[in-house]
Amino acid sequence: MASLSEEEENYVRMSLLLTGISPRAVRTCFDNEFAPTNLDASLKKEYNKLFDLKKEGIINQSQWSLLFPILPDVPDSKTFDVTLMTTLLYNLTPMTPPLCGFDRLPTAMETTQASDLARIKYYRNNLAHLDDGKIDINFFNMAWDDVTSAIVRLGGQLMKQECDHMKTKQLDQTNQEIMMDIKHSNNEIQELKESLESLKQSHTEMIKSHELLQENHAVVTKEIEEIKISQNDTVPWNIRARIKDTLKSWKDNDDKMFINTTAARYILKSIQENSCVTITASSGVGKTYTFRHTALQLAEEEYDVLLVTKPSDVLRFNNPNKKTLFVIDDLCGNFSVDQSDIKSWEPVMEDIKQILDKKQTKILAACRLQVYQDEKFDSLSVFKSCVCNMLSDNICLSKTEKHSIAKLYLKSKASEIGDYYDLYDCFPLLCKLYHDNPELTVSDFFQNPFSVYEAEIDKLLKKGYHTKYCALALCVMFNNMLNEEILTGEVNEVTKATIENTCESCQLDRGTSRLVLQNELNSLTHTFIKKEQNVYKIIHDKIFDFLAYYF
């Protein structure tokens, strides 16, 4: 058999020192801390702490079986390896860790039990990672002295002689055969390591692939669910998408510009307790904002909020298996009762009552006060069942609420209008209009807002802005519903004559381009004009009322 080199002998001697002698030194230290006769009781006393170490993976199942063997067996430190004994000493005794912790080589100045245990652990780990089975003489001498000193301090002076003998004794054939086995195993170990790395990489790729499949499965499952919902949805997808966009717009505005009032809380409570609620008020009181806020609150209560304009939509979109809130703004007309609207609702009143009786469906409607008070409206009994008049004494805006609205819209200028809160019912509207037109004189505007608008329109005419003046007049002529197609597409003779006559009345040429008029309408947006779904309208019904009177 080939002889071992000096470096290979160093490796064998260090291995025998660390695996043969040092465990007995650690066990001596361990038995001094945990008397063998009381070991069972000591471990049971620390059961909870040991169980936590097991949960954290610091103690494995094999070690756990040694700590708590099946009766009648009892734990015995002779069955514990260095790792287990060190773990128990670290965690169950009041040891002060070395300066750099238990996982680093302590300095030569550190000679406590904790430092010596860390020292032996460090060199054992170092030995385990020497793939070539060789230790050079310089490292060997330094490490041998360091480990021997630790063994003596832990196991007693008698172990010094054993360590010294191990350093110089003649290695027998068994020791040499062990070394040769180690040498022959190195290549196999390296191959195993490479194979393990390959397996790890394959495992990682498999995990990534599995995660990707899970993600794709989740996406497909979601799409299938959406398709199923769509197939069972009573609302066509295009209308559903439009409603979703509208509700998002409402939500964005509600989050920024809504003040919760007594009226809002009262109306919310009413719709929670009743199947149908009608909100009434004159223009500009905050009816629309409160109406939208209430609908959004019901959406948070998992109601399917659907915006409808025709009674047939309620029957067509109703889903008896889903909580639904139908919302209807400007019920039966803006400025006066629309007789055709009344006639379209009357035939379906009984059907709607039956739907509401099932308690899954609710209706929230907003209606101008003059429309609601018209005797023709009396035939729509459903909308008379629960009425919230925002001008009534019990829910009308308080001075505190008006002040909060003024602060939200006017900021620092709110203090300038304290005396004008009660001049007009449409105080919320005035706050919004001033917020959108801050160049106006705040005190003049709140004292007499319509004279301010009258002066603004007169100024258009006097300064020769006849096209802007005509654009406003056209909105009145088309009853606040000036469709964009009227300005860009083919029109009938009646419509053409209306536009030409209005242009002439506003001191414009009868042949003025409709596209020029459209440009002027666009320039007036956010001041006098708003555009909704390709329809030009005056920015608020109250302003339209004034313009209708003006023109």
Image (cartoon, rainbow, N blue to C red):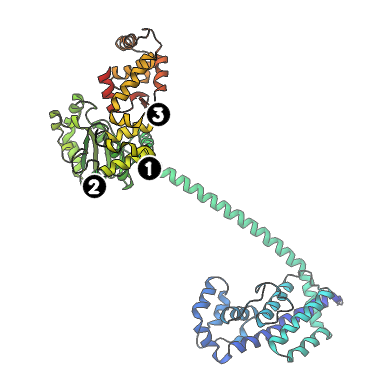
Label 3 CA crowd tier, 10 Å (few <14, some 14–19, many 20+): few
Of callouts 1 and 3, the N-terminal one:
1
Q: Residue flagged by tag 3: what amino acid is it?
A: Glu
Q: Residue flagged by tag 2: what amino acid is it?
A: Lys
Number of numbered callouts drawn = 3
Locate residue 208, reporting x and y percent. 58, 52
Q: Please tell me whether mark 1 sits on a helix, a strand or a loop.
A: helix
Left or right of 96 in this view: 252: left
Instruction: Give me the disc on residue 112.
Output: none
* Quadrant (top left/top right/bottom left/bottom right) for the N terminus: bottom right
**Residues at marks 1 and 2 touching, judged by CB atoms closer than 8 Å:** no
Task: Please tell me which residue lies in front, 327 or 167.
Answer: 327
Q: Please tell me whether mark 3 sits on a helix, a strand or a loop.
A: loop
Q: Please tell me whether mark 2 sits on a helix, a strand or a loop.
A: helix
Instruction: Name the front one of labels 2 and 3.
Output: 3
Locate residue 303, reporting x and y percent. 30, 44
Residue at image mark 3 = 439
In terms of image quadrants, where is residue 87? bottom right
Task: Please tell me which residue lies in front, 395 or 456.
Answer: 456
Camera sees residue 535:
yes
Q: Residue at x 47, y 45 (%)?
A: 219
Left or right of 173 in this view: 78: left
Residue at image mark 1 = 255
Camera sees residue 253:
no
